[in-house]
Image: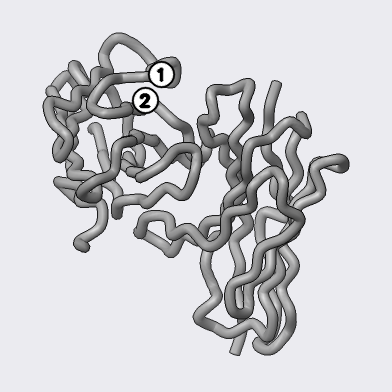
Amino acid sequence: KQEVTQIPAALSVPEGENLVLNCSFTDSAIYNLQWFRQDPGKGLTSLLLIQSSQREQTSGRLNASLDKSSGRSTLYIAASQPGDSATYLCAVSWEAAGNKLTFGGGTRVLVKP
Amino acid sequence: DAGVIQSPRHEVTEMGQEVTLRCKPISGHDYLFWYRQTMMRGLELLIYFNNNVPIDDSGMPEDRFSAKMPNASFSTLKIQPSEPRDSAVYFCASSLVWPNEQFFGPGTRLTVL
């Protein structure tokens, strides 16, 4: 069964510290992997999308890496700010699953001022 | 662009009543997705459309759920009759090219009493 796991479920860091969020997935035959941010009571905002052929993607303070062989992706957020407090979701699409997105449970992040 | 629009934002109904959720995708997007988010099961894909045609409805939980897309700018998700276990946040998302970046609406929080 194709699954996506995010550990830990919650994380608290002081402002200024770098954030490291983990995502693991079964079955390395992915099409792409996406990181989303969700604020309380809001929809999801796409942060980064990594195609199967790519190793990483960067946008501002965000960097996401992809290691298909080990079934892992990591989202790095540099110099965290209180405004980074949110839930971060990882989602994977597999070719064998018709390219539908399968989401992890998310990591709830709190950045303390 | 106004983004993906969903209505209503909140819906409270009694068990047995019919519920209709509405979605307007981003103009020009050919793909439309309906998701459900609960604490227990996380974010799950219910159904998706391509060019107004349902492609995969394997995530629809049971026959009480139905979805339509009569034109490129409008889709509905209907639950009839509703049950308390249908209480969740329902998201609509659209995509220009799939499988690539999806844009999510703000969601409809459904409470069935």
Query: Where the N terminus of chain B falls, by quadrant?
Result: bottom left
What residue lies at 35% left-to-right and 59% top-to-bottom?
A42
Camera-nearest residue between B44 and B25: B25
Q: What residue type is labelled 1?
A: Asp
Camera-nearest residue between B11 and A82: A82
What residue lies at 28% left-to-right and 43% top-to-bottom?
B29
Q: Which colouring convention does the figure follow?
A: one colour
Say which residue label 2 marks.
B47
Quarter-of-image position of residue A41: bottom left
Say which residue label 1 marks.
B56
Residue B39 percent location from the top left of the image:
49, 42
Which type of secondary structure does the marked residue at label 1 adopt? strand
Q: Of marks 2 and 1, which one's residue comes earlier in the chain?
A: 2
Dot 1: chain letter: B
Q: Mark 1 and mark 2 in contact (Cβ < 8 Å)? A: yes
> Dot 2, crowdedness within 10 Å: few (<14), some or many (≥20)?
many
State the residue lying farthest toward the right. A70
Which type of secondary structure does the marked residue at label 2 adopt? strand
Query: Where the C terminus of chain B falls, by quadrant?
Result: top left
Residue B99 percent location from the top left of the image:
49, 38
